[in-house]
Image (spheres, coloured by chain):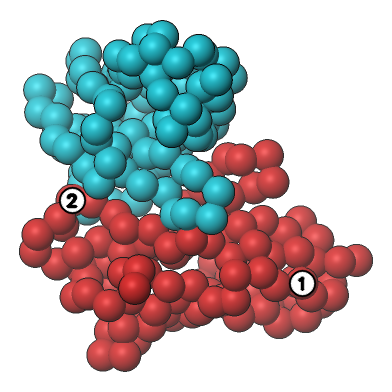
Amino acid sequence: KNEVEQSPQNLTAQEGEFITINCSYSVGISALHWLQQHPGGGIVSLFMLSSGKKKHGRLIATINIQEKHSSLHITASHPRDSAVYICAVRGKIQGAQKLVFGQGTRLTINP
Amino acid sequence: NAGVTQTPKFQVLKTGQSMTLQCAQDMNHNSMYWYRQDPGMGLRLIYYSASEGTTDKGEVPNGYNVSRLNKREFSLRLESAAPSQTSVYFCASSDSPYNEQFFGPGTRLTVL
C-alpha cells in the first residue's frame, strides 16, 4: 500500500462544476503539500498546510490530521484548471526533510 | 528571476553512455532536490542537498551521483546509463527542507 493515495485517478467535469480531489496518507506527518502539474509538464506548488484550511482564489485545501485525509476543492472550475494535481506529505520524524508524493489526479474540465 | 533552470530539456543516450544533468537556482535557496517521474508513479526523490556542502540519498539513488557545486548549482550524473533510467527528471529547490519547493521545467531523458 502506498503511503499516499489520491482519488480519483482521473476526473472529467464540465466548466463551472465544483471539484473535489482527495488525498489519504498512512503515516504521521508534519505538513502536506498540494501541487499542480501543467499539461506542458511544469510543476507549481499550490498549498502547504499542517492543519485546518487554506484558500487561494478559487482553490481551497483542507486537512484532517486525525483522519489522515486532505481535500483540494476547486470552485467554478474552468478549462484552464485542467492539469494533474499532486498531493505530497512530509514525515514527522525520520525523513522529515523529504516529501513522499501521491500518483496524481488528472483533471479535465470541458467547456 | 529565472527561478530553477535545468539543462538540457531533452536528451537521448545509448546504454552505457554517461551524462550530467545541470540544475541552477537564483533564489538563494539552501536546499535542492533531484526527482524522477515515471508514468503511473509519483515523483520519487533521487538525491537531495539540505544545505551547501551536504548531500543525501533519497528513495531511488542507485545508478546516480550528485554534486552540490555551490549554493546555486546541483548536478545529477548518470555514470553508465540504463534503459530503466528513461524518465523525466525534475530539479527543485526550497529555502529550507520544511518549506514549499520550487521546481524546474524538467529534463526528458531516453536511454536506448
Instruction: Tell me the residue at 61%/40% (across/down).
Output: A41
Q: Residues within 10 Å of mark 1 (few under 14, many from 20)?
A: few
**Tag nearer the camera, 1 or 2:** 1
Q: Nearer the viewer, residue B86 or A96?
A: B86
Classify residue A19 by image quadrant.
Answer: bottom right
Q: Chain of mark 2?
A: A
Say which amino acid is labelled 2. Gln
Q: Is residue A62 left or right of residue B12?
A: left
From the image, tell me which residue sits under label 2: A97
Q: Where is residue A32 shown, x and y percent of the image?
A: 34, 67
Classify residue B32 by image quadrant.
Answer: top left
Q: Is residue A39 left or right of residue A13?
A: left
The answer to the question of whether label 1 and label 2 lie on touching residues, with beta carbons closer than 8 A, is no
Q: Chain of mark 1?
A: A
Which residue of the protein is positioned furthest toward the bottom in this rendering? A67
Say which amino acid is labelled 1. Thr
Could you give the CA–CA distance between mark 1 and mark 2, rounded to whole angstroms? 34 Å
Residue A12: mark: 1
Inspect this view and state whether residue B2 appears. no
Q: Is residue B68 left or right of residue B93?
A: left
Q: Nearer the viewer, residue B5 or A8?
A: A8
Q: Which chain is assigned cyan?
A: B
Q: Where is residue B49 shown, x and y percent of the image?
A: 19, 33
Apparent colour of chain A: red
Q: Where is residue B99 shown, x and y percent of the image?
A: 28, 51
Number of marks drawn: 2
Report the quarter where the C terminus of chain B lies.
top right
